[in-house]
Image (cartoon, helix red, strand yellow):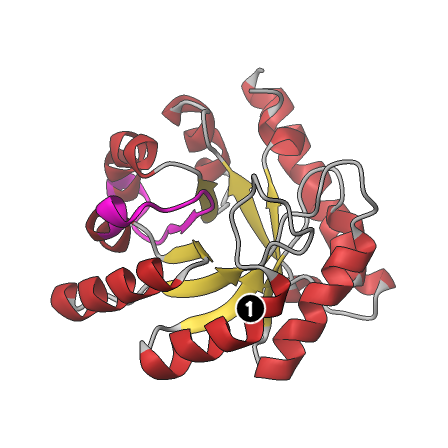
Amino acid sequence: MSVEEILANLATVQATISDAARESGRMPDAITLVAVSKTHPAERVRVVLAAGQREFGENRVQEAQAKWPDLRREYPDVRLHLLGPLQTNKVAEAVALFDVIETVDRPKLALALARQMAQAGRRPDCYIQVNTGEEPQKAGVMPAEADAFIQACLKDHGLPVVGLMCIPPTGEAPAPHFAFLREIARRHGLATLSMGMSGDYLTAISLGATHVRIGTAIFGDR
């Protein structure tokens, strides 16, 4: 994909987000675009950085370690989100590299993150990933366990939990999943909702998303 195509895509997504926010009675700056740069080379990412985008998402710690140190030196105000499952043996690297960890989903990981943050003196924002579709192959805490897990992360582990994240099942209407996640967040006083990707972010915005994760609509197919 050419530089011109990437920039045109970015502008279209930004304008669409603004329009969707206004239609929902919200201010456009209430929604943060997280550009999902996983599997895309640094050259493509640099195009979007140069256009002013500062929030990016990666799925794998190892890929982010290879791609982002040089880009961060050029653009030190970047905020990098981890969007993929986090293994406990990668916690130290994740805490060092990412500004937001969106995939906290089990007690063992919560404990490892709390210990590493205390040791490193660095506290990335955390989102609890909820498996709203109860899919056995997908990461995320099951809905029946979500309330207790959120409170354990906040009170027992002292994690900086600021919000929730979900990925609705493929082939299902996303709106009920987004509404469900919003209700869980409301119960716990969490203001941040990371929900919505290239195919469903307009629905997510209408249901309260504060962060939308968009890759294909900006960078093209991987």
**On the image, which quarter does residue 206 sit in?**
bottom right
Q: Position of residue 73 (x, y in %)?
A: 24, 42
Residue extending farthest left: 119
Q: Residue at x 37, y 36 (%)?
A: 60
* The stretch drawn in magenta includes residue 219: no
Is residue 169 depicted above or below 4 in this figure? below
Residue drawn at the location 77% of the way across and 65% of the way down: 179
Please state, as top left, top right, bottom left or bottom right, where the N terminus lies in the image: top right
Pick the residue in front: 141 or 74. Answer: 141
Above or below, 176 relative to 202 = below
- Inspect this view and state whether residue 138 appears: yes
Secondary structure beneath dot 1 equals helix
- Check disc 1 and give the amino acid type: Glu
Magenta segment includes 86: yes
Q: 121 left or right of 219?
A: left
Choose between 150 and 148: the one closer to the eye: 148
- For image coordinates 72% across by 68% down, the residue present is 27
Quadrant where the C terminus sits is top right
Percent x, y of residue 16: 77, 46
Q: How many marks?
A: 1
Would you place residue 90 above or below residue 176 in this image? above
Residue underneath mark 1: 145
Residue 28 picture location, percent across and down: 70, 62
Residue lying at the far right in this picture: please name it. Answer: 23
Q: Residue visible at 47% across and 46% down?
A: 83
Quarter of the image holding residue 89? top left
Q: Residues within 10 Å of mark 1 (few under 14, many from 20)?
A: few
Residue 198 is drawn in which quadrant? Answer: top right
Query: Where does the magenta region start and end?
Result: 73-91
Q: Is residue 217 left or right of residue 105?
A: right
